[in-house]
Image: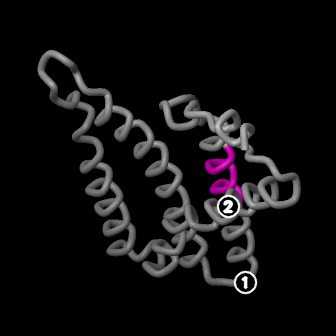
Amino acid sequence: MTRIPDSVSTDQFSGGSNTAIETRVFFAMVVTVGLAVMASAILAPWRVTGGLLLGGTLALLNYHWLRTSVAAVFNVNIPSERPQAKASRYILRYFVIGVISFAAYKLRLVSLPATIAGLCAFVPALFVEAGRQFYFAIIHREESF
């Protein structure tokens, strides 16, 4: 019983650096998009491949923008207690992604369902990271934060 309180650490909740997790998720997103584009280049029409490539690229860009804009929102200026001006990027990123996707669809360059599927590249990346965490937690009985 004395080991339980000693093993609890609040470092993971104190805003420490989670760059390893972010890097693994980003890399898994890149691999997911790459595999989807390669498979669709062989099996699907060019508009589907273009849609997956566009959606995957926008998903990677969105992930980067999300990290920076959320960091800006939570980086509150103490004297004024207001988020910095970069917080507007949190909402602006949806507008940019929507305009690019809509323009590519209207120009008949991409398939809209394939673009939406490419935008979902974050989901398989999270499953890969969850599988990695379960592996370390169950097999090795440790956490890998």
Q: Nearer the viewer, residue 124 or 129?
A: 129
Does dot 2 land on a helix, a strand or a loop?
helix
- The question of residue 30 being in magenta is answered with yes
Q: Secondary structure at mark 1?
A: helix
Rendered position, 129 above or below 109 = above
Residue at 64% in and 38% down? 5
Amino acid at the residue labelled 2: Ala
User: Which amino acid type is marked by label 1?
Assistant: Leu
Q: Mark 2 sits on what residue?
A: 130
Camera-side residue of 99 and 87 = 87
- On the rendered image, what quadrant is the C terminus found in? top right
Q: Quadrant of the N terminus?
A: top right
The residue that appears at 20% across and 30% down in the rendered structure is 85
Label 1, label 2: how far apart the Cα atoms are: 29 Å
Residue 49, picture quadrant: bottom right
Q: Position of residue 129 (x, y in %)?
A: 68, 57
**40 up-or-down from 25: above or below:** below
Q: Residue furthest front?
A: 1
Number of other residues with Cα within 10 Å of mark 2, as a class: few under 14, some 14 to 19, many 20 or more: few
**Is residue 42 one of those drawn in magenta?**
no
Q: Nearer the viewer, mark 1 or mark 2?
A: 2
| Residue 47 percent location from the top left of the image | 54, 77
* Residue 59 position within the rendered picture, expressed as x and y whole percent measured from the top left: 49, 57
Q: Which residues are magenta?
A: 24-34
Instruction: Look at mark 1 in the image and give the residue it sits on.
Output: 43
Q: Give how far across and how far down residue 107 sits, in percent.
A: 36, 72
